[in-house]
Amino acid sequence: MTVTSLSLGAPPAVGLGEKIWRVNWGLILVLTAIAGVGVLALYSAAGGRFEPWAAKHAIRYGASLVLLLMVAFVHPKVWLSLAWPLYVFSLLLLIAVDVAGKIGMGAQRWLVIGPLQVQPSEIAKVAVILVLARYYHGLTREQAGKFLYTLAPLVVIMAPVALVMVQPDLGTALMVMLGGAALLFVAGVRLWMFLAAAIGAVGCLPIAWTFMHEYQRKRVLTFLDPDRDPLGAGYHITQSKIAIGSGGLFGKGFLKGTQSALNFLPEKQTDFIFTTFVEEWGMVGACVLLALFTLVLVWGFSIALRSQHHFGRLIALGVTAMMFLYVFINTAMVMGLLPVVGVPLPLVSNGGTAMVSVMFACGLMIGVNVYRDAQLPLAR
Amino acid sequence: MIRFRKGDGERASLFTRRSLLLAGGQLTLMSALAGRLYQLQVLDSERFSTMAEENRVNVRLLPPSRGLIFDRTGEPLAINRNNFRAMVTSDRGRGAEMVIDRLDQILNLGEAEKGRLLRELRRSRNFQPSVVRENLGWEEVARLEFNAPDLPGVFIDIGQTRDYPEGELMSHIVGYTGRVSDEDLAGRDDPVLQLATMRFGKKGVERSLEDDLRGRAGAVQVEVNAVGRVVRELDRTDGQAGDNVLLTVDLELQRFAAERLRAAQVNAEHKSGSVVVIDIVTGDILAMVSDPGFDPNVFARGITQAEWREMLDNPERPLNNKAISGVYPPGSTYKMVTALAALESKAIEPGTILPCNGYVELGDIKFHCWLKGGHGGLNVVGGLYNSCDCFFYEAARRTGVDKIAEMANRLGFGQISSLGLPGESAGNQPTRSWKQDKYNIPWQQGDTFNLGIGQGYMTATPLQLAVMTARVANGGYDVQPNLLLAKAAPREELAPPVPTQKPAAPSMRLNPQHVALVREGMNLVVNSPSGTAQQLRYDSTGKMLDPQFRFAGKTGTAQVKRISERERAMGVTEAQLPWHLRSHALFVCFGPVDNPRYACAVIVEHGMAGGATAGPIGRDVLVETMKRDPSRRTGTFRKTASL
């Protein structure tokens, strides 16, 4: 393995003050605003009480913010060297849940370590980004465009996908696949390969269908025709649409949502938190929340474009893609545009691991900005 | 400013291009989300708002309690009994097994019942309760309440079941209720009828007064959660119970009539007959017996297929109210109609004497008088009390079928009465055009002869006979039979009308002298030593009736099968025929003879002789009626407070 440097001379030293200045405080403000929406929605979902969700959510956000800042000040070369170990570790955790995971929601997703419930798939999402960024960091444009050099990234993506599918967790598998694809796209993988993959995926649909669990098939069928069984599998989508639609332009008002308060909404504190929020705050509230998320994406792209090392660019873009997939899949799902797959709304949904992993990822992204002109070895 | 280092430049610019593409794609998709929000929250908002409201607010109807039915003296005939039901709900069977096991310990459900409950609970959504057991006793209710903390989801529900304390006796008058059918719903948009627990009048007064008895539903608006459990009550409108009604029937007289009719048939192969007692001044039906009856409480609790089949197949037709739907040839009881028609149409004069030689010949057919050798010559009064057939053949011939039919219609034949009970028959009052339409053959002289003595095509119901007798007895007033004495909303006073002596109904403008002649003829039927029912001057012990209870009447024996000359010659008598071919026995009467108030019609199906079988029943029922004098027995309304 050759180690070369593409840099011209020594980089300018960056002082602590400059580092703090480079932290995207505006982005952190936006993230805090989103988490604030989460607290409001969870407070309302609990019928106007901080227990059991809202208070914990706020505390968890505070703790995650500290984590974010700590991650942001870690030099990217550390992540460069930690990428593979973290990836292997996350694969091992995934295997562990498959073997000894706790049964939850009909799928094995959590691993209980002492007082902590860890969702290894969340770690895997970040690890895949790191590994792919590191991999393409060491390739030239010509290499990145070659098919042979694309095989390894495919394995990197598909290994956790396969393990997550076994659980089964369709949402996470989809996110890792699409997130990985986005990274491959910006890294320079030829377009014909995406085309071939798309055709291959369509060809594999019938095979995937046979591997699906009954409840997953039902969800897909229900998505295609929610009125098929309005009280059964289609119930969630229908009720969610009723809640969102009845919110109207300005919503029913804080704590005045009837659909979630009266338990018509399933999982109102997790996957359907967007619905709870939108029922009470209307289209105006929904657009504000989506605008906040869009701001996060814009920040992500600008960080990516300003990074002067490829590793950083890819990390920032990977994190941005992950954020986008979270938001899009979740909201499209509760609005009846996608089948119901278990994807939370980041920073808003109740749930510890997702919050931690998203804040960790954002920390990585901010770290890219802090160390945007760092010189990194081209290790492969 | 963005600068790229050497060697990194190429891939960086590719990265930038593709990143911008990706960003554009993401922005497009985010816009799509906003578009979807616009679609849901602006375009379709109204529809979803309605759906949310429907989700949340649930209107539950409160069934009204049904009006009570009493006889004219205030005796209860149909009441509501509280039915304590144990109900259980659970959220799709969660924890149901434990609860059902405990219920089993308290109510001894048994394995089959436990299985049924568990299945129902697992199947049920939205906390739909299942019935554990109906008609709980006080002790069972108390035990369930005592153990309530250990029985989550179990509650006692108070429903109402109709109860008919007199059972079979009043079955044809009061009727019964049943589940609401599609036919019942036609033309009625009362939403309470959609309730599964609602009952609807099917027969008798329960049916004819359905819209009065039903009452108005209350409604309670409740907020429910997704599983249908009530969170709180938003609004409540109290309903109104149905009207309570007093019927014209005198329960004790009804009981007497039913027992008397039953006693008279004690040796008969089948028991089937009817008695109707009517107030000739008001038209009030005082008793209306159709024997046999049925137990309406069987319908209230839910009749089985087998029980229903058995009732339908019974030759005595217990479900059939023979007083209003049984049609019989009236026989000689029709002779009053012929007499009045002949007199009113001037076909005969009060003093006209018509000859009787024992038969009348028409072509080669002989029309016999019941008395072999004949009555010689008789006027109309003599014709009536001797029941001379030849007199009425000739009177009918002179009057003509259509004049007779016209008089018969005025007296109530050939049409459905004002009673309003379901299933009433109009009988058949034949006319020339009726026969032409029905059989496409012209009316014959012989048909007129038969009609004159109430045979042939002529059929009538016992109610029609009673009404005819009443209209003759009251001097020609057009009284209408009725069953409803008074009705009132639950908290209002149930006040019966003031007893009257003079009919409120319009006069039919018959010549009073003619009516008097017919009444005299009926008087002499009973009170002349040569009357056809002279034995009825005496009571069943052979004692002459008290003068205040003397009455007038007319017998009738209606042939079902004609006994031919040959059979007569061979000595075949009625009693040797199978039951269903024997003649019907009829008797109509009114009393007291000097100042009539009550009329009665009796029919004993296949009872052979009117004077011998039906007559004594008529006498005893009429005398009992005069003794009780139910027209004065109104105004009391007992027991309602406690019901």
Image (spheres, coloured by chain):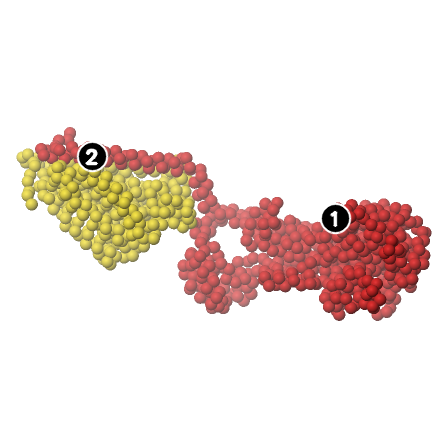
Chain colours: A yellow, B red
The location of residue B531, given as percent across then percent down, is 89, 61
Q: Amino acid at mark 2?
A: Arg
B272 lies above or below A376: below
Residue on which disc 2 sits? B18
Residue B521: image quadrant is bottom right
Q: Secondary structure at mark 1?
A: helix
Query: In the rendered structure, which disc, 1 or 2, sits on the residue that comes first in sequence?
Result: 2
Report the residue that reaches farthest toward the left: A9
Residue B438: mark in rendering? 1
- Out of B542 and B498, give the one closest to the viewer: B542
Q: On the picture, is B629 further left or further right than A193?
A: right
B220 lies above or below B313: above
Residue at the (48%, 68%) spot, across then down: B110
Residue at the (49%, 47%) spot, across then down: B58
Residue at the (60%, 56%) spot, across then down: B178
Subunit under mark 1:
B
The location of residue B95, given as percent across then percent down, is 41, 61
